[in-house]
Image (cartoon, rainbow, N blue to C red):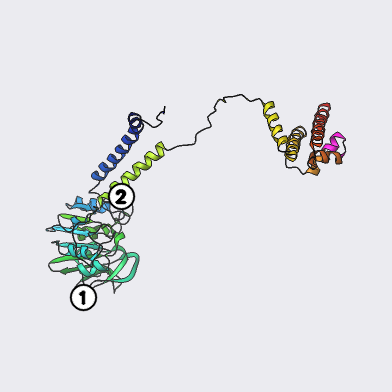
Amino acid sequence: MSTPVGRSVGEGWRALRVPLLVTGAIVLGVVILMVATAARTSGPFSPDSSEASGAKALATLLEDHGVQVTGTENLDDAVGSGADRALLIGPSGSLSSSDWRRIASSGWDHLILVRPDREALETLAPGIENASSTLPAGSRSPDCALPAAVKAGTVTVRGTTYSAPSEAESCYGDGVNATVIRMERDDRIVDVIGTQQTFTNAELAEDGNAALALNLLGTHPELVWYLPQYESSTFDDAGEDDGPPLIPPDVRYIAWALAFALLVVALWRGRRLGPVVPEPLPVVVHAAETTEGRARLYRRSRARDRAAAALRESALGKIYKVHGIPRRAEPNAVVSALAARTGLDPAMLYDILYGGPPVDDAALLSLSDALQVLTQEVARDVHDR
């Protein structure tokens, strides 16, 4: 008759219900957190970031002056209707040429490009080019007729510079290239800004930085603050857009949440090496019986060398303990110390403790007797002292 050794359905459920509940709670918590923070942005130059590289101070300043700031990382928010609204495109992420064309075809009245790349300039601000030079940090006057710059006056600027056509307004530069450029094209205002740090939390309060930011970005009742990520509609500009991707971008976040939950459960339920648990032996074996059994094994295999080595090691251990001799002491040092304390012949001591293996059983028995006499002599000598 066979007996099943696997778990029953009830036992399996009782063992797995707690891990499943914990995994579900973690996934649910992550999903709720994602939904709650879906409209928030993060990272450098984010309107929700309080870090030195963030721009929460500027977003708060704009809202205090009646401008509604909407932070987003979704491309669809940047290609919506732009009537009476301004769109700020941050420097993060990467967009394809087709994405830039979608933004250009939207009805935005005012575009603010912060440190745009070549494709963004070619699509949204043709004629403005990256000058491939960096302006060192410092306070500079506008040296232009742009009203926003004239009102702000001296501003702390640094960063990327651009070359612009003659019809554009170029401000805060080195006389040749500029870091703030305004161009009007097709009834649309396009501002190109290369001095990102000027508008961050760390430097907004310096010079006229806050005034320049307010005059450039606060011209419309609503400002959409778009920080591009790496989920553009397509990264292949060779063909046309065939529709939405097969796997939505949000799926990757859910996958990461599931992976994190599985990691937590694995760490929680994984096998750990705890302290040694004592187990009662089924049979008590006395030390004398173990010794006799080991001796019989040595005798059966004619291992006189191993038996002699075990006897000598045991005798040396007692001698080390009695006389306080280090276990790593050289044989000559041990023999000299014993000869000085016991008066025995050093040659005899060396042969007993470190000699060659016995040639037969009689020699092994003789060695055992000699070692026993030696240990007794050493113990007696110490007791007499």
Which quadrant of the structure image shows residue 12?
A: top left
- Secondary structure state at the residue bearing disc 2: loop
Query: Along the line of sight, which residue is nearer the eye, 289 or 155?
Result: 289
Instruction: Please give the residue where the numbered disc 2 appears in the rendered image.
Output: 50
Residue 191 in the magenta stretch? The answer is no
Name the amino acid type tagged 2. Ser
Give the magenta-colored segment's residue range.
Answer: 338-346
Q: Is residue 150 visible?
A: no
Q: Which mark is residue 240?
A: none
Provide residue 313's location: percent of width, then percent of height.
73, 37
Residue 165 horizontal side relative to residue 140, left or right: left
Residue 219 horizontal side relative to residue 273, left or right: left
Which quadrant of the structure image shows residue 84?
A: bottom left
Q: Which mark is residue 166?
A: 1
Name the amino acid type tagged 1. Ser
Residues tagged 2 and 1 counted as in contact (Cβ below 8 A): no
Give the residue furthest to the front.
1
Residue at 33% in and 51% down: 51
Q: Tag 1 or tag 2, which sits nearer the N-term?
A: 2
Residue 45 horizontal side relative to residue 169, left or right: right
Provide residue 250's location: percent of width, then percent of height.
25, 50
